[in-house]
Image (cartoon, grey):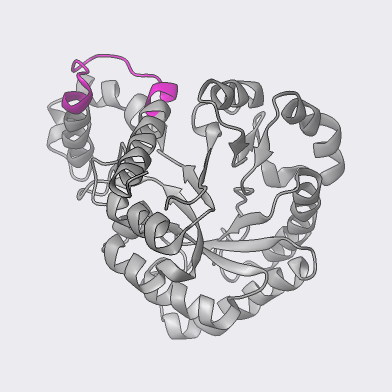
């Protein structure tokens, strides 16, 4: 039986203007967003008082709710103690915003590290600082969601598992992003096998073998199989949050075409050019045809809805 999944999105990928984001949310018939860029500012730069005064009334007027807060907490250098202390204060404010919006989750990360360094030396510092964030959230009713992201400690599934084994449970869980695993040269299907049952939140962002984000279903994210397992086996009733990285195709495509054939010769730029042409062909877009960021977002939404409908049909619903 299909679970009661809910679709959310990083609508700031269309515009930083909050009302523009909310108009698209309503146009798609949805009611959840994952706030990140809000009126030219990152969500983490707002105090709870500022948010309640300036932002919440707009959200309420559109009937908008938060699936999670797309915060940058933990997206700092591992040894930057000044930034760490500043982010702990930001986290306190974000928890206050969560309470105002009846939101359960805050997305976060596990610190930038030098990939050429010694991960065994990073680990105790990472765990200590993550526990510091967890202590800020303890007892608040808000759960921190660690997202796998390239160039941080928890970029691959084995280190995400380390983090979960150390902190996982009440108040600290994992988010899953298939595209980010591809960016880190890891098979997202294998990562899902290792971590799927430990993840409570899922981003919808596909990626080609060339490590370029593409519309859902055009990449190696394995989303159809993953969503089928989540819905039909697990009875997942959480969020699928759209994050199509609209700018890469919508904004860069024609610039790459104008500079062709130079862009077709320079690695890794040539990979973008090649992937952009595949997207053009898949969606019937001319080489120099313009595509808006909103259109790319809608493609992602429609592809997800189609997948969910197919899964429901396979289940006989």
Quick check: 37 left or right of 314?
right
Q: Check the picture and name the quadrant holding the C terminus.
A: top left
Residue 205 image offset from top left, x and y in percent? 38, 45
In the image, residue 295 lies in the stretch drawn in magenta: yes
The number of callouts visible is 0
Quick check: 248 left or right of 203?
left
Residue 249 image offset from top left, x and y in percent? 32, 30
In this orientation, which residue lies closer to the viewer: 304 or 89? Answer: 304
Residue 125 visible to the viewer: no
Q: Quick check: 226 above or below 154?
A: above
In the image, residue 242 lies in the stretch drawn in magenta: no
Where residue 110 sits, quadrant-wise, is bottom right
Residue 262 image offset from top left, x and y in percent? 15, 30
Residue at 59% x, 59% y: name it.
Answer: 108
In this orientation, which residue lies closer to the viewer: 275 or 314? Answer: 314
Residue 96 image offset from top left, x and y in percent? 81, 51
Q: Quick check: 223 above or below 63?
A: below
Where residue 16 sits, quadrant-wise, is top right
Residue at 58% x, 61% y: name it.
Answer: 145
Residue at 68% x, 65% y: name it.
Answer: 84
Residue 232 visible to the viewer: yes
Quick check: 179 left or right of 112?
left
Question: Which span of residues is magenta-colored?
Answer: 280-296
Q: Quick check: 147 above or below 60?
A: below
């Amino acid at each position: 039986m299909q679970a009661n999944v809910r679709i959310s999105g990083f609508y700031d990928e269309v515009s930083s203007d909050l009302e523009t984001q909310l108009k698209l949310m309503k146009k798609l018939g949805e009611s959840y967003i994952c706030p990140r860029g809000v009126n030219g500012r990152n969500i983490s730069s707002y105090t709870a008082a500022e948010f309640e005064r300036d932002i919440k009334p707009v959200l309420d007027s559109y009937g908008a709710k938060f699936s999670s807060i797309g915060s940058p907490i933990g997206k700092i250098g591992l040894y930057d103690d000044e930034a760490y202390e500043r982010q702990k204060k930001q986290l306190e404010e974000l928890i206050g915003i969560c309470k105002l919006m009846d939101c359960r989750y805050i997305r976060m990360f596990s610190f930038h590290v030098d990939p050429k360094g010694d991960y065994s030396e990073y680990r105790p510092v990472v765990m200590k600082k993550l526990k510091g964030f967890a202590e800020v959230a303890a007892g608040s009713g808000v759960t921190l969601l660690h997202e796998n992201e390239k160039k941080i400690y928890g970029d691959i599934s084995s280190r995400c598992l380390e983090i979960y084994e150390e902190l996982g449970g009440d108040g600290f869980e994992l988010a899953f992003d298939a595209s980010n695993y591809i960016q880190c040269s890891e098979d997202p299907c294998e990562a899902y096998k290792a971590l799927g049952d430990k993840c409570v939140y899922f981003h919808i962002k596909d990626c080609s073998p060339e490590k370029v984000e593409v519309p859902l279903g055009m990449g190696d994210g394995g989303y159809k199989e993953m969503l089928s397992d989540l819905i039909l086996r697990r009875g997942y009733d959480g969020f699928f949050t759209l994050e199509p990285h609209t700018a890469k195709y919508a904004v860069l495509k024609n610039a790459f075409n104008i500079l062709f054939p130079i862009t077709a010769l320079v690695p890794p730029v040539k990979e973008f050019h090649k992937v952009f042409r595949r997207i053009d062909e898949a969606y019937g877009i001319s080489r120099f045809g313009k595509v808006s960021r909103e259109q790319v977002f809608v493609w992602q939404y429609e592809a997800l809805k189609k997948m969910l409908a197919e899964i429901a049909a396979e289940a006989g619903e």
